[in-house]
Structures are given as structure tokens and as C-alpha cells.
Amino acid sequence: MEFAKASYKIVINARDNDELNKARNDILSATENSVDLISVPEDISREDICEDLVDQSINLFNRLDVMISNAGISGPEKSSAEMTSEDWDRVIDINLKG
């Protein structure tokens, strides 16, 4: 929120459109609609989506000064011995790569 209040140009992302819209509305409300903001509903566990977010930022705002990734999941509620490789890949893709 402080970046928005300091007039940074903002790109936000979430998988859940409702959460994304809430974050967008919170930022716009806190800045009295005076911030340049785009919101992108995508899954950042995919590398191409991460690259696209950076590209959109640069194409729209001509630069990227600060990037914060705040994505994270805990994974399925089962023991690590019960996790499939797909379960593990999903956690790693979001928590370490996203």
C-alpha cells in the first residue's frame, strides 16, 4: 500500500479474481483513485505468466522498479510421504518459482 501511496505504478496479480478485485479496490480507495494500477488474474506457478507480468509492466509503464512476490501455499494436508510428485511440484512452483 505504501508504494501506491508514494505514486508508484502498480501491477497486482492473484489466481482468485475476487481477491484480486478486493486488493485493487483497497488500493484505489487508499489512494483516492490517484494511482496507475493494473490487475492481472493469472496463476504465477507458470513461468510464462511471470514473464508476461514483467512484460506488461514494462510495456505499460516503460520500466519496472520494484517487484514483490508474495505468493505461497502450504500444499495438500497430508504427510510428505503421502504427497505425489504433482503435489510437490505445485508447492515448489508457487513458493519458490512464482
Image (spheres, rainbow, N blue to C red):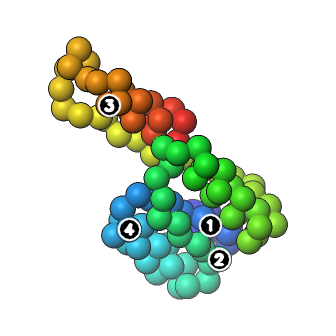
Q: Residue at x 52, y 45 (%)?
A: 46
- Name the residue nearer the viewer: 62 or 6: 62
Secondary structure category for the residue under label 4:
helix
Give the vertical position of 94 relative to 34 (above or below).
Answer: above
> Is any part of residue 1 visible from this angle?
no
Q: Residue at x 72, y 59 (%)?
A: 55
Q: Are marks 1 and 2 in contact (CB under 8 Å)?
A: yes
Give the vertical position of 5 relative to 83 (above or below).
Answer: below
Query: Is tag 2's residue or tag 4's residue first in the polypeptide sequence?
Result: 4
Secondary structure category for the residue under label 1:
strand
* Distance CA(mark 3)–CA(mark 4): 23 Å
* Distance CA(mark 4)–CA(mark 1): 17 Å
> Is disc 3 surrounded by few (<14), some (14 to 19) or many (20+) residues within 10 Å?
few
Query: Is tag 3's residue or tag 4's residue first in the polypeptide sequence?
Result: 4
Question: Does residue 8 appear left or right of residue 33 in this picture?
Answer: right
Which amino acid is tagged 4? Answer: Asn
> Is any part of residue 42 visible from this angle?
yes
Query: Is tag 2's residue or tag 3's residue first in the polypeptide sequence?
Result: 2
> Is disc 2 surrounded by few (<14), some (14 to 19) or many (20+) residues within 10 Å?
some
Q: Which residue is mark 2?
A: 36
* Distance CA(mark 2)–CA(mark 4): 19 Å
Q: Which residue is mark 4?
A: 17
* Distance CA(mark 3)–CA(mark 1): 32 Å
Callout count: 4
Mark 4 or mark 1, whichever is nearer to me:
4
Query: Is tag 3's residue or tag 1's residue first in the polypeptide sequence?
Result: 1
Residue 28, percent across and down? 51, 79
Q: Which residue is mark 3?
A: 87
